[in-house]
Amino acid sequence: MRRLRDRLRKYGEEFEQRQAARASIPAWAATAKLLIVAASILSVCGTLLYAGFALHELLHPGTLGRHMPGPAPALIVIAAIFAGIPLALMLSNVLVWVVPPLRDIENKAFAKVPNATFADGMRQLSYVAALTVPICLIAAAMGIIDPWI
């Protein structure tokens, strides 16, 4: 418990440093990052939604055109969103890192901030994804199999 408290206290100090680093990023780079993040979230969540409803239609033909009873659509949608966000953030990190001008701006802005490197961000997002994605896949599978019809 003490270790968690120390980490949270340290995170508060790092938060201010991260905010100052974000403020030093030029407007065009911040806008480009925002567009990359938005496109990543829409594409990953949209793909997961499409896959979930396509699998549901494969198992239960003809149900997609009419009202799907029960919690099946909600399970598929919520699972796709919660599983898609950490995966999309990982994708957007990679896309920002691949573009050399954005990577250089990020490296310069966050050079003095602890635990703010590309590898640290990907490691932290992989922890979140490792927790949320399996749970969401189980929820989506329940919606896809849909024993409530």
Image (cartoon, grey):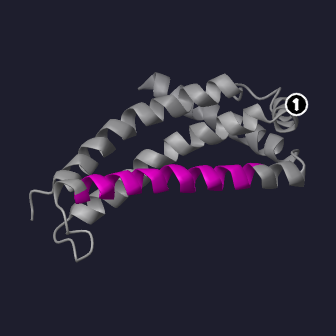
Which residue lies under the disc numbered 1?
A: 108
Q: Quadrant of residue 149?
A: bottom left
| Position of residue 41 measured from the top left corner of the image (x, y, whole percent) | 56, 52
Q: Which residues are magenta?
A: 33-57
| Position of residue 72 measured from the top left corner of the image (x, y, whole percent) | 22, 62
Q: Is residue 120 above or below residue 125?
A: above
What residue sits 80% from the left and 55% below the top?
A: 31
Q: How many marks?
A: 1
Indicate the quadrant containing the N terminus: top left, top right, bottom left or bottom right: top left
Residue 6 is a magenta residue: no
Our reading of the magenta stretch's main secondary structure is helix
What residue sits 24% from the left and 59% below the top?
A: 57
Q: Would residue 122 be found to the left or right of residue 26 on screen? A: left
Is residue 115 in sight in this rendering? no
| Position of residue 35 measured from the top left corner of the image (x, y, whole percent) | 72, 55
Circle 1: element type: helix
Farthest residue, direction bottom: 66
Q: Would residue 121 be found to the left or right of residue 106 on screen? A: left
Q: Would residue 72 be found to the left or right of residue 100 on screen? A: left
Looking at the picture, which amino acid does disc 1 mark?
Lys
Closer to us: 131 or 149: 149
Closer to us: 81 or 109: 81
Closer to us: 18 or 30: 30
Closer to us: 98 or 34: 98
| Position of residue 99 measured from the top left corner of the image (x, y, whole percent) | 80, 36
